[in-house]
Amino acid sequence: MRLILITLLLGMLFMRCSTNADDRKKTNIWFDKPAKNWYEAIPIGNGSLAGMVYGGIESDTIKLNEETLWSGGPRDIQNHKAFKYLPQIRQLLLDNKNKEAEKLIDSTMLGPWNECYLPMGDLVIAHKAMNEVKEYKRELDMNNGIVSVNYSIGQVQYKREVFASFPDKAIVMRLTANQSQKLNFSASLGSLLHNEVNLLDNQIVLNGKAPKHAYPHYLGKKEAVYEDGYGMQFQMRLLVKNQGGEVVQEKGKLSVRNADEVELILTAVTSFNGFDKNPVSEGRDCNAICEQRTDLLEKQNYNQLKKRHVEDFSTLFNRVSIDLGKSSSDDLAISSRLAQYKPDEDPGLTALYFQFGRYLLISSSRPGKFAQPANLQGIWNKDLQPAWSANWTLNCNAQINYWAVETVNLSELHLPFIKMVQELSVDGAKTARNMYGAEGWIAHHNADIWRTTSPVGGSGLWAIYQVGGAWLCHHLWEHYEFTRDSDYLKEIYPVLKGAARFYLDNLQRDKDGFWVTNPSESFENLYRKPDGSVGWACVGATQDMQIIRDLFQNCQMAISKLGVDQELGKQIEKYSAELLPMRISPTNGQLQEWKDDWEPADPFSAQVAHGWGLAVGNQISSRETPELAAAFVKTLENRKPWEQYNCGSWVGSFSAKFWSRLGNGEMLQTVIDTHFQKAVSPNFTSHFSGYWQIDGNLGITASIAEMLLQSHTGEVVLLPALSSKYPSGEVKGLCARNGIEVDIKWKDGELLEATFYSPNSVECKVRYKNKLIALDLHAGKMHTVGNSSF
């Protein structure tokens, strides 16, 4: 990954700054009261450290996380018995004995649950009893990644600023008052994990230990397992720097008395030393790292720390600006704005939500040696038994997190995800060999920080998802498509090749002679056969075949561009021609989700897996494959997935992506409106089944971007799914494939002008509505076209 980092950093030196921050109105969300709970707190993060800022008066809390703090350690959970039963399972499915196959899958192919991403602890600031508080305001400025809390008590005005600094690897808070000697509070650190707290002069040091094993929430309340010799170590260290007054030690806390100004600087680190290293016997020295960082930070003043943070954060955030229109709601507190949202009003909320998604990506996914990609909750978690382990769910959630990253001009934030894919291929090669007797590598339904790839427990309905690794490879190729970095392509090609190699070895012939996955299931969905029987095990689910076709296509293009493995390319080409094709049901005219003409057991199922070729890949489009697109529209009209559940998480994300790629701006807007009304918490995070699932935020962000710009079909398409809700507007800095940046202005629903920029000389086809033009872009120069050009 070092080569990728160097390449991107060099590229950033020449990247056009698409927006001037001085000319932009700040992009803020604000609250008129402290947070009462997690879903009212404001998230901050620097990719490794994260916090949820409550902004309380008498007691303020920041709930803290560190990206590598997980239960467990490296482990071998390879299934060595499944391969023995695989031929029998496959034959049962070919013989239409699906129930028998399901029982055998569940008894022979499944394994243990993933480990869990864990909460690190709390920073609690307890103030002396306050009189009546006035003019309270808690605000997130997304342009610079700073949260501020302001309020008055009598004639005294109090202010706090807090941010998570990527350059300085710390969370920093400054407390001030407009009168001297008015700051009186205590600071303490705590954790739900096993820990010990010590005071060292003006520092609080919490040393903690993670459990050997923790359980996901859906197993019911279970105590985590601690055992000597197991469990990741971690340390949090809080430095208190005061101007005026004094700092004293009191019962495990540091108390500030009569100060004029106070800085709180928190550093944290775990003993994690890599996915394949034991965090106990081979772990990093948490104390030495934290102590060194704190010593360096103590020598810096607040303005220096803030300046470095703002320069770093705003450089990323300000690459893209967006204006979709204004309304009287723009000045409301975000909780009030959401509560009174109406579909025909407040166009600015969509633009704000788009930028909040970019803010979350910047805060939760930064490159680095031990960097982790955004997980199910990004980088934030408060529970010992987090929802779905707060892991990486590979049948959609983890990938949805990164749908937007390239288009919204945050390409280097893709790198932690790409690195995870490379790491998964290591255990994935063992799983391919042990479970399937195949070369190459595979990942199934779930992954954790220890990068195991075997099926998890519970049921094959989700666990035997056979294309998790192949879908991940789509992101490897997407990053190349946007950057055109040939050195990067050389680095990730072995991973693409290994994934393709697995399917060449593992695909099976069905009774019609097509290559199919066997066993298979369709995105945790149940089918109903014409005879009324219900099940999930099958062969060649449509989504499987779409994803494998995409992998083969991308691997062939990589082979062609690199000039390698020509014989492998010929083999892939032959297999591609014999993959089970998509089929349209002769019964109802809908795109079939399964090989056979079965219907979902729930006719209104939100699980619409076979739209992958539309929403993610490029195998279904209204222009290139109108019959398939029309058949899938019938599927959507029948199931209406956005009306199921609450339109959060993958439900809203897929629904929005379907309509954006179909070019239907009004239906896209219906999904966005439903999402805002049902799935967004008071702090702007997306909830699903009672929990924050960040793919709801990030998936909708991706579709808002694709409402304005698409490039997945080989053309740069302007305003492909613009809703009538946004008759006039402007966006700057969106990215198209082939390294192109685009600014777009429109008025009264019609394009005014589009400006293109590329650091390299490239040719591109540009479409607006039904007209197509060809452009020759010259390196480093802007090219502007107007409506009259089409």
Image (cartoon, rainbow, N blue to C red):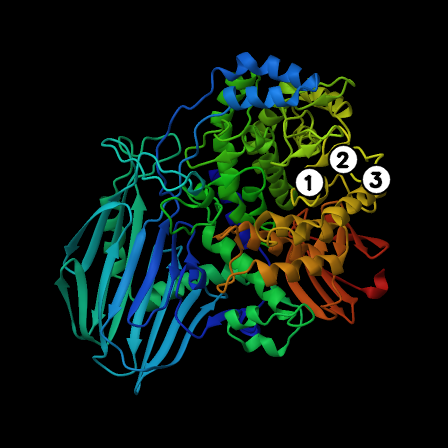
Image coordinates of residue 777 in percent, x first then y, are 73, 53
Is residue 320 visible in the rendered structure shown here? no
User: Of the residues under marks 1 and 2, which one precedes in the sequence?
Assistant: 2
Tell me, yes or no, whether the two marked residues, 1 and 2, touch with CB atoms within 8 Å: no
The residue pinned by badge 1 equals: 612
Between the residue at mark 3 and the residue at mark 1, the CA separation in whole angstroms equals: 18 Å
The answer to which of 766 and 175 lies nearer the viewer is 175
Amino acid on which the number 2 mark rests in the picture? Gln
Q: In this view, does 114 lie above or below 482?
A: above
Q: Determine whether the residue tagged by mark 1 lies in a helix, strand or loop.
A: helix
Residue 334 visible, this orientation: yes
Residue 340, percent from left and from top: 59, 72
Instruction: Spot the residue most to the front.
Output: 532
For the point 52% across and 62% down, the residue is 684
**Residue 228 drawn at (x, y percent):** 22, 32
The disc labelled 3 sits on which kind of residue?
Gly
Which residue: 44% across, 71% down?
Answer: 139
Look at the picture and state if 593 lies above or below 238. above
User: Which sits in the foreground, 77 or 87?
Assistant: 87
Quarter of the image with the C terminus in it = bottom right
Disc 3 or 1, which lies upstream in sequence? 3
> Type of residue at label 1?
Trp
Instruction: Report crowding for label 3: few under 14, some 14 to 19, many 20 or more residues within 10 A (C-alpha).
Output: some
Compared across the picture, whether 612 is left or right of 210 comes to: right
Image x and y of residue 256, in percent: 19, 69
Secondary structure beneath dot 2 equals loop
Residue drawn at point x = 26 percent, y = 30 percent: 281
* Above or below, 329 relative to 381: below
Cα–Cα span, label 1 and label 2: 12 Å
Q: Name the residue under label 2.
A: 592
